[in-house]
Amino acid sequence: LTMSMESVISDDEKRLMLWQAHHDNLTKLPNANLLHERLARALIANQQENKHGALISIDLDHFQNVNDSVGHASADRVLTDAAYRIAMCARETDTVARMGGDLFFVVLHEIEEVAEAERMARAAVQAFEAPFVVEDREIFISASAGVVIFPEDGHEQGELLQKADAARMGAKNRGGNQIAFFEEQMNSVAARRLELETHLRRAVANNEFELYYQPVIDVSDDSVYGAEALLRWHSSELGFVSPGEFIPVAEETGLIVEIGEWVVTQVQNQLRDWAQRNLEPIRVSLNVSATQFRSAENAEALLALLARSGCELITIELTESALIDDTPGSEIFIEGLPKLGLHVALDDFGTGFSSVGYLRDFEFDVLKIDKSFIDSICEVRDHGLVASIVAMGRILGMRVIAEGVEDKAQLQQLRQIGCDYVQGFYFSKPLPLADFEAYLERLNTRQVAG
Ligand code: C2E
Ligand code: CA
Ligand code: CA
């Protein structure tokens, strides 16, 4: 049987099959198999001849966003173009391979000096300066590159590939669109990120999330106006991980979509529970990241989820950066939100760069002044800024909440300015549900007594 099979396959076909086993279908570049072969060969040859080489790991920054927003076919065209741009930077003797997705590797089989590898990596990143044309639209995509030198950074393939990836992640953590050489401490940063991602994938199913509630206080009578729901993660493996650390990972990996659905459901259930127990109604605000409504599909799903139960007491907090992204989903989401009858807050106000423009295009119900202004509110200049923001909010019919109020002096300044709502450690840290309910209880008793 084997004989007859072989006889029907021509030499051309055999060559084609061999070629296909070593090349990537989409970009026609060498694939992972061929990369491994070439890298192994380079390592042996260099060792024998006492020469140096380099390995560069390159990927596109936020490619997932591109994928979500332009569709599969266009994303493939971007990848093909990206492959071409990277290949154009390489020398005849280098190997440029695609590992899959938007990840590429370049082997510089032989280098005389480290600067050669640096030049190649920089050229590859610079090759992304020109926009990509997708469906007659120009989109800007940057890339990041991580460089290792062998044998200095390692003698082994696996080690070199991993270190080049870690270096690339280092470049990305510094904002992307740049190159980085491997440094020892990058291993721990990359390892931590991978660890977070791995455990985050199971966190919803394992029930590891909890919502804390931070009271928002009405300054006029110290009553609770509402609360902000803040996510807490108690990982069974990693222990407590702060939102500042895991939210960015959840956003980059898209896991925030599933986590965000959990948050919405949780808040809805909580409001229903309070209503059934006849507690004084309070508003609950929740944070929504741009990633949660980047694609049209996700935007619609999130709107539908919100619409499932009463929205009168819910406030959605969006940051300016969530509005800046012009994606297929953002328009759907931003237009759909007001129709649900909930409130929308502009979070971290003052930290972006064109905040006032958004106030013209979209009617926010609430403005949350960022903590950084409150920190220095006792200084004349920032006092003036906060006073102007509060006045502007008033004129535009918005409620203004000062965030991160930590001491009495700040509160007094805010009172004097006429800011009606504050949130911060001075009144209370974010509290687990039971403690938050106890806080409400205490306040009510005090008011009844007083
Ligand atoms: P944020 O929306 O600006 O939330 C306010 C943050 O300030 C919270 O940090 C809160 O604990 C902290 N904070 C409040 N008052 C004070 C104060 O007086 N002093 C100081 N130093 N800090 C104060 P947290 O809970 O660590 O959350 C960090 C960020 O993580 C949030 O910033 C938000 O952007 C994000 N986040 C939290 N929960 C969620 C969620 O459910 N979904 C999404 N997408 N993001 C979330
Ligand atoms: Ca917030
Ligand atoms: Ca905030």
Image (cartoon, rainbow, N blue to C red):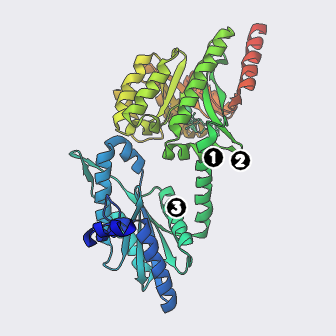
In this view, the residue in front, 171 or 353, is: 171
Q: Which residue is mark 2?
A: 237
In this view, the residue in front, 262 or 338, is: 262
**Label 3 Cα crowd, 10 Å radius (few <14 / some 14-19 / many 20+):** many
Q: Which amino acid, mark 1? A: His
User: Do we see residue 178 in this rendering?
Assistant: no
Using the numbered discs, state the Cα–Cα distance from disc 1 to disc 3 in whole angstroms: 21 Å
Residue 288 x, y percent position in the rendering: 50, 32
Using the numbered discs, state the Cα–Cα distance from disc 2 to disc 1 in whole angstroms: 8 Å
Classify 360 as above or below 161: above
Query: Is residue 439 shown left or right of residue 96?
Result: right
Residue 257 x, y percent position in the rendering: 50, 36
Using the numbered discs, state the Cα–Cα distance from disc 2 to disc 3 in whole angstroms: 25 Å
Q: Which amino acid, mark 3? A: Gly
Residue 233 x, y percent position in the rendering: 66, 39
Disc ID at residue 67: none
Q: Which residue is mark 3?
A: 170
Along the polypeptide, which appears first: circle 2 or circle 3? Answer: 3
Q: Residue at x 50, y 90 (%)?
A: 48
